[in-house]
């Protein structure tokens, strides 16, 4: 259930005046692809199952955002359940799917560390955003949106002054974060596009 009625959420997003000078940051698991039952980590490309045509949703966001960037915690590497090469193969397969559908991810950033390690890059800490801005000097966090399905995603965005979008499709028993953490709530990325970003007909 959204924090605000859908028509208010649409008005709020329209008031942001998103344009190609903006940057879209996305979590991966639970936003673009499903977390699989009994499979806590996506280790190989064949395990990718996209949520509600998320590649198409990304293609529809291309005219609105100048940069689209994935930021993801991947502690499976720290657990030695997969390697960085495995993860890059997954990213490569995703990118191929996106390009075929008219979308493009400009960069993929990940934290490989265990949640028990006090690193600077695991969300909600902000090193991935800081690195992205170092790599893409046009990024202004006041003109950026963070989309995720975990509270850590919302805090990551808010810590950098971004707008935040919370998705619920991969969280059957989700608890919506408080309003000061999530600006709007939608089931899927495609719902964010069709009910929030696109102008009303």
Image: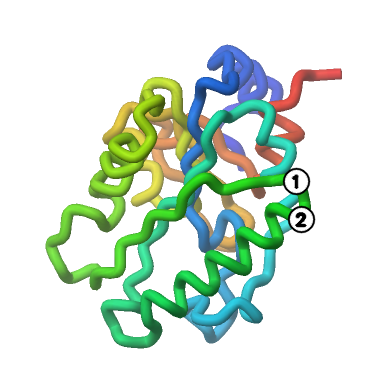
Q: Are marks 2 and 1 in contact (CB under 8 Å)?
A: yes
Q: Residue furthest right?
A: 201
Q: Which residue is mark 1?
A: 102
Q: Which residue is mark 2?
A: 100
Q: Secondary structure at mark 1?
A: loop
Which quadrant would the N terminus be assigned to in this image? top right
In the image, what residue occupies the spot 66% across and 23% down?
A: 10
Residue 196 position within the rendered picture, expressed as x and y whole percent measured from the top left: 68, 29
Q: Quadrant of residue 109?
A: bottom left
Using a 10 Å C-alpha cutoff, classify the residue at mark 2 as few (fewer than 14 neighbours), some (14 to 19) or many (20 or more).
Answer: few
Using a 10 Å C-alpha cutoff, classify the residue at mark 1 as few (fewer than 14 neighbours), some (14 to 19) or many (20 or more).
Answer: few
Q: Quadrant of residue 150?
A: bottom left
Position above or below: 31 against 159: below
Residue closest to the eye, 133 or 48: 133
In the image, what residue occupies the spot 33% across and 78% down?
A: 77
Q: Is residue 6 left or right of residue 130?
A: right
């Amino acid at each position: 259930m959204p924090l605000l009625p859908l028509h208010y959420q649409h008005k709020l997003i329209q008031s942001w005046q998103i344009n190609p000078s903006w940057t879209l940051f996305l979590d991966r698991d639970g936003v673009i692809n499903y977390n699989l039952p009994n499979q806590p980590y996506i280790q190989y490309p064949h395990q990718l199952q996209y949520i509600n045509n998320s590649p198409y949703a990304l293609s529809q966001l291309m005219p609105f955002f100048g940069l689209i960037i994935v930021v993801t915690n991947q502690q499976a590497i720290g657990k030695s359940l997969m390697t960085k090469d495995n993860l890059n193969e997954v990213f490569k397969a995703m990118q191929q799917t996106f390009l075929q559908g008219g979308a493009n991810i400009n960069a993929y950033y990940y934290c490989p560390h265990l949640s028990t390690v006090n690193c600077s890059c695991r969300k909600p800490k902000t090193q991935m955003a800081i690195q992205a801005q170092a790599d893409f000097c046009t990024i202004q966090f006041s003109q950026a949106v963070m989309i995720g399905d975990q509270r850590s995603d919302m805090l990551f965005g808010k810590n950098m002054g971004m707008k935040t979008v919370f998705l619920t499709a991969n969280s059957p028993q989700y608890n919506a974060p408080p309003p000061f953490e999530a600006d709007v709530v939608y089931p899927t990325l495609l719902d964010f596009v069709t009910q929030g970003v696109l102008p009303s007909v």
